[in-house]
Each structure stands twice: as C-alpha cells, then as structure tokens.
Amino acid sequence: MATGRTHRTATRSRGIPEATVARLPLYLRALTALSERSVPTVSSEELAAAAGVNSAKLRKDFSYLGSYGTRGVGYDVEYLVYQISRELGLTQDWPVVIVGIGNLGAALAGYGGFASRGFRVAGLIDADRAMTGKQVAGLTVRHTDELEPLIKESGVSIGVIATPAGAAQAVCNRLVEAGVTSILNFAPTVLNVPEGVDVRKVDLSIELQILAFHEQRKAGEEAELREAEAADAVQGGKPAADAAARPTAAKKRTGQGPDGDVPAVMPA
C-alpha cells in the first residue's frame, strides 16, 4: 500500500486554486451522503445546495478536475466520489502522528472519521511520562523521546499538534526536522515553518468568537427594530396636530420635509 511519504498528488502542478481545494472536502461529504443513499446522479444545483455553495462556483471548481457533468442528467455520484478522493489523495494510506494526548488529543485519536477517509493514526506521543504506556483508542501512548523513530518507522508525513501553546513550536520544529511536511495545528498559537511545509490551523476559540460577533450583531439589529416599532406605535397614538408638528421617523427615512408631502430636497 502506498504511503503519504512516497506519493504526492498533482493538485499544485495542475494549477487548482487553493479556494477550490478547500471546497473539495465539502463536495465529497455531500456526495458520500448521496452515495450511501444509493443516489446515482445529482444536478449541480442540488449538490451545490448540499455543500453550501452556489452552483456556478461548483461548476467552475469541477472544471479544474475535468468533470463537466451531462446536460439534463447531472453528475455521476460514484465517479465524482472517486475523482475527488483521488485528487485529495484519499485513495492511499496517510500515516498520522498525534502529539499531545490530553482531552483533545485523545478525542482526535478516537475519531472514527480518520480511517474512513484514508488517514491512519500511526502513533500517539505525549511529554508526560505518566501517560507513557497507556492505551488510548487502541493505541499505546509513547513518550516524546520516541517521536523521531516513530516518524521514520511508520513513514509519517502528517503531524497533528494538540499540545499547549507553549510547547507547540518546539514540537513543530521536531516534526519538520524528522521529515514531516504537513501539520494540523490545534494549539492556540501561530507556528513558524520553513518553505515547503504546509500548516492548517484549527482554533476553536476564534471560531466561537466569530459566532459571538454575529450573535451580538443580530441582537443589536433586533433591539433597533423593537425600538423603531415602539416609536411608531407611540407616534401613531398622538393627536394629529402634534404629529404634524414633528416629522416621524418614517418621514425622515423617506426624505419628507416637515410639511409631509414636500420633499426635503426638491428635484432640479
């Protein structure tokens, strides 16, 4: 079986944009769900909706793969699953090492989605000697002293860092020096790597902060709407003379002057 260290996909040489590469897993997830339901074909509109993108962008992305579908029929689901899996390098075995077996690292080790997508957890590493020898997700935790031998013997090319922030850069350096060229970083810090090493950062706190921003904005918009509705209700209950004396919020928004029917700015 081929391993990640003996094979590289041709994605970069074929000029597929990074934005398209980032969307391929979304398409694959939607297609896999269709395949599990034995759906033979899917239209670009249906697949785009399932993946959360627009259909024009989907068709453009698939054109980089040389897949254009059939007018009136759509895309062959099984063929697209194979095509995207091959492009992403998921038709081969990718040995992965996880460094940092705390709560997060242990959860990652037990994630069943790795194996079904071509990733094999080859080893678990932790700096705490109290963890050495313990079984996590069916694997024996090894001390960091064994990191380099593990990478060499298992042909690891992808490293997952789930350590505290203060230890992440040192772990990254050792992974790179041992030959690892792709790193998935869960530590809340930015890693410095040499050219040719790819790093993907997953920061859960940042994602939560972004969601908090959107929640705050929605709450503010709802509050403004309630205030406007309350103002309109109060204004509607006032005597006509008082209403004529002061323009309502609605008049201000539409550009009406104090006389109601006369625009504040007359057309030329």
Image (spheres, grey):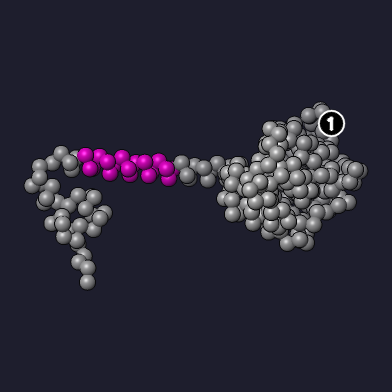
Q: Is residue 137 magenta?
A: no
Q: Does the magenta stretch include residue 225?
A: yes
The residue located at (66%, 40%) in the rendering is: 30
* Quadrant, the N terminus: top right
- Residue ranking furthest to the front: 72
| Residue that numbered label 1 is attached to | 140
Describe residue 27's horizontal placement relative to residue 217 as left or right: right
Magenta range: 216-233
Q: Is residue 7 above or below residue 222?
A: below
- The front one of 91 and 33 is 33
- The front one of 144 and 215 is 215
Say which quarter of the image contains residue 8: bottom right
Q: Can residue 243 be seen in this view?
A: yes
The residue located at (16%, 60%) in the rendering is: 262
Instruction: Say which amino acid is labelled 1.
Output: Thr
In percent of width and height, residue 134 lies at 81, 28
In percent of width and height, residue 83 lies at 76, 48
Q: Main secondary structure of the magenta part?
A: helix
- The front one of 226 and 124 is 226
At numbered mark 1, what does the secondary structure look like: helix, strand or loop?
Answer: strand
